[in-house]
Image (cartoon, rainbow, N blue to C red):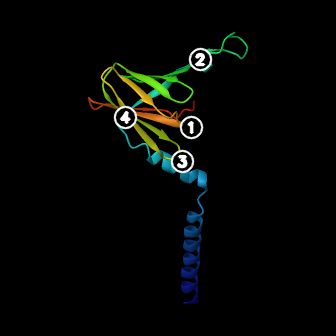
């Protein structure tokens, strides 16, 4: 009978160790899990970065004049989101044009929602600091989500 109780004690000890180690999940795993869960728009169309004027400028020193604005284009199956990055704000247009709302989500989970007018224009003030992504919700019910980017 002593062997039977000893087996249960070992099992309980192993279960206790499993619970303790589960509490010690590395912070980067927790962050990755939360980021994966935050992708709630399973039906959202993904719009990938297809143009960045900084990358298009070529190697440093090739251009004589620096571009006054940075331009970014996110292309999806049905929609394109074009951005111009100013010193303190973002201006953009949804193509094809239609009204809706644009969420600007930062890595810390902060969301700023701005209107998109009938011709697809929008402005984001202030310009996001650090990494962000855009979530477009059109009046016709489409949802378009961009990848994370930094300006």
Q: Which residue is mark 2?
A: 68
Real-space Cα distance between discs 1 and 4? Answer: 25 Å
| Residue denoted by label 3 | 32
Question: Which comes before the other along the chain, label 1 or label 4?
Answer: 4
Q: Quadrant of the C terminus?
A: top right
Q: Is residue 75 visible?
A: no
Task: Name which residue lies at 57% across and 18% down.
Answer: 53
Q: Looking at the image, is 13 positioned above or below residue 60?
A: below
Residue name at image x 51 percent, y 29 percent: 89
Q: Residue shown at 66%/11% (left/top)?
A: 65
Residue 142 occupies which quadrant of the picture? top left
- Residue 15's disc is none
Q: Secondary structure at mark 3?
A: helix
Q: Residue under label 4, please give it.
A: 44
Identify residue for label 1: 129
Q: Most extreme residue toward the right, as rendered? A: 61
SS at mark 2 in the image: loop
């Amino acid at each position: 009978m002593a062997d039977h109780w000893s087996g249960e004690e070992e099992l309980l000890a192993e279960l206790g160790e499993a619970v303790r180690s589960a509490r010690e999940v590395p912070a980067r795993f927790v962050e990755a899990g939360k980021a994966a869960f935050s992708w709630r728009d399973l039906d959202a169309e993904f719009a990938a970065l297809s143009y960045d004027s900084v990358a298009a400028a070529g190697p440093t020193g090739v251009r004589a004049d620096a571009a006054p604005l940075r331009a970014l284009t996110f292309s999806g199956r049905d929609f394109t989101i074009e951005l111009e990055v100013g010193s303190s704000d973002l201006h953009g247009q949804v193509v094809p044009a239609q009204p809706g709302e644009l969420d600007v989500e930062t890595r810390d989970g902060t969301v700023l929602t701005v209107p998109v007018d009938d011709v697809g224009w929008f402005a984001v003030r202030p310009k996001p600091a650090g990494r962000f992504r855009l979530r477009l919700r059109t009046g016709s019910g489409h949802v378009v989500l961009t990848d994370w980017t930094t300006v």
